[in-house]
Image (tube, grey):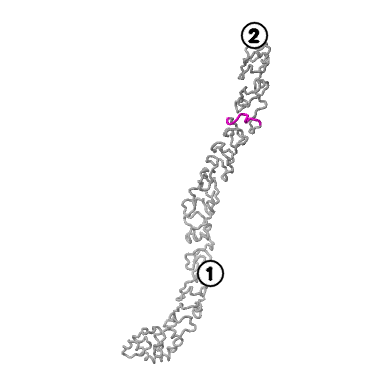
Amino acid sequence: MTNGPFGGAAMRTVHAGRTGLFAVLAAFLTMLIAVTQPALAQDSANSMPGFDHVQVGGIPLTGRHAEIFCEACHVNNTTKGTPRDCVSCHNGGIAPGKPASHPPVGNSCQDCHTTRNFRPFAFDHSGITQDCATCHNGSKARGKPANHIPATDRCDNCHVTTNRKDVRVDHRDVIGSCASCHNGTTAPGQPADHIEAPDDCASCHGTLTFAGASVDHLLIDQPCANCHNGTTAMGKPVDHIPAPETCDTCHTPFFERSFAAVDLDHDAVPGACVSCHFDGNPWGAESQPPSHPPVSQDCAECHNTLAFSIGRTFDHQETMEPCATCHFGGNTFGAPAQPGDHMATSDDCAACHGSTASFTASLDVDHNEVIGTCQSCHFSGNTWGAPTQPGDHMATTDDCAACHGSTASFGSGIDVDHNEVIGTCVSCHDDGNTWGAPTRPDWHNQTTTDCAACHLSTDDFASVSLDHDETTLNCASCHVPGNNWGARQQPGFHAVSLITSNDCTDCHNAGEPPTPIMNHSLVVDNGDCVDCHFTYQSSTLDPNNLGSSRQTHVPSDNCLGCHF
């Protein structure tokens, strides 16, 4: 070697004084005392057999250090003050020091350099306090190559200090979109079987692994079934409810973490409600509870799809059961029950209530369904609006149906049952009555008010059996020609006789037919008997008239001579 502190004249100076150095070292080492032969000239300490530089307190002589002369370090053949670290020698005087271009590091040279040579070396970056780019700028040390991906200068976020090629990309330091690198050349790109999606990879993929992507369905513009076909992605299970392939109608991107979180659009579901809402269904659809009213299975007639209890309008055409099957006290479905003050009736509500929208609308009471008498409902203060007996009603019993033959109208179908009337005839058959009862005509004979004494029937006034005890005048007041009531008149033979008295009862009683008992004292002039007792042959009277006996012999002029 001709240059440097270990070459040329320096090496010759070291060689001249090596004999004295070995004498000093021998004083400290017992092994050298035992040497019987004089020391031979050596190039370095390692070339001396049996000598261990480390054992006597020196540094390990490895690499290039093993080749230098002892005097290069042991100046003036002395061991005292001999440098023991790199920088004490490599200071630019004894040996080459750090050049001006050396990275700003500490003085532990051995952390990066070996004793064989300064280059190549294993740089220990742990002692570096500056940013990577301070050295790795293309001048002091290798910088980012031209084809480096766009990234910040924080190299150590991706690279390790032992090997540039051992890279783990920290995507936080990458500048640009995913596709800037993941283009199939710089880094793996989208495979051919990737679902159709934009280049915004980070919306679905993480930076640790491509697998396990959380798909952002807002970026997908294809029908769900293009991917969710059971191969590319999970498809509809075999027990899925009957539905079209428009999955996003119910499964929205807001629920993309789980298929179980569904906002079901019933408009998209084909089939009847019971296709899904049945006992034991695998998708958790509510089924008809045991306490549900007995109805058909057309749920939509009453329920809407927002909630079973909201917007419920019961369609009574869907049930074939009697009203009382649902409308009973304590039912669990909110059907109104018969109120406590309801009139006593059968359970056939529909017989009276003609509308299912309102109990009071289209109400037409079917009296066949009412339990009890008329008075059970038609009383003052009833709460269901049944008309009551008016104040001017005739006095009767409570058996309204005995007279009122129709429940549609009080005025129609009336046939008064006089057995139900309380009071006398004139209690009703009086002038000015408001119920249309016929009154006694003006031509009626003068009688008491005991109509029933003569009128034997309440169906017909003409059915009469005259009770003469009820008349208030004499016989001639009624038994006159042209009377309106059919009273018999005085027969013609009364005029032939000289009977002039109008007191009929002197001879006649009130029986029918009349059976007179002749009071001869009433004959005014004691006229001849033959005026009445005439022969049959000459009689002009009705031969059936038994009013007088007939002569059967030739009359004499003095009947009283024989008849007395």
Q: Which residue is mark 2?
A: 560
Q: Which mark's residue is nearer the viewer, 1 or 2?
A: 2
10 Å crowding of disc 1: few (<14), some (14-19), many (20+): few
Question: Could you say where residue 21 lies in the image, as x and y percent from the top left?
Answer: 37, 90
Q: Which residues are magenta?
A: 419-431
Question: Could you say whether the residue bearing mark 2 is in a helix, strand or loop?
Answer: helix
- Examine the rendered structure and indicate whether residue 48 appears above or below residue 311: below
Residue 109, label in figure: none
Question: Could you say where residue 194 lies in the image, as x and y percent from the top left?
Answer: 50, 64
Three-letter residue code for mark 2: Leu
Three-letter residue code for mark 1: Ser
Q: Answer yes or no: is residue 177 visible.
A: yes
10 Å crowding of disc 2: few (<14), some (14-19), many (20+): few
Q: Does residue 430 show up magenta in the picture? A: yes
* In front of the other: 378 or 51: 378
Quadrant of the drawing holding the C terminus: top right
- Examine the rendered structure and indicate whether residue 344 appears above or below residue 9: above
* In front of the other: 99 or 334: 334
Q: Main secondary structure of the magenta part?
A: loop
Q: Residue at x 47, y 64 (%)?
A: 212
Question: Could you say where residue 119 lies in the image, as x and y percent from the top left?
Answer: 44, 82
- Examine the rendered structure and indicate whether residue 415 appears above or below residue 552: below
Quadrant of the drawing holding the N terminus: bottom left
Q: Which residue is mark 1?
A: 177
Question: Could you say whether the residue bearing mark 1 is in a helix, strand or loop?
Answer: loop
Q: Answer yes or no: is residue 61 visible.
A: no
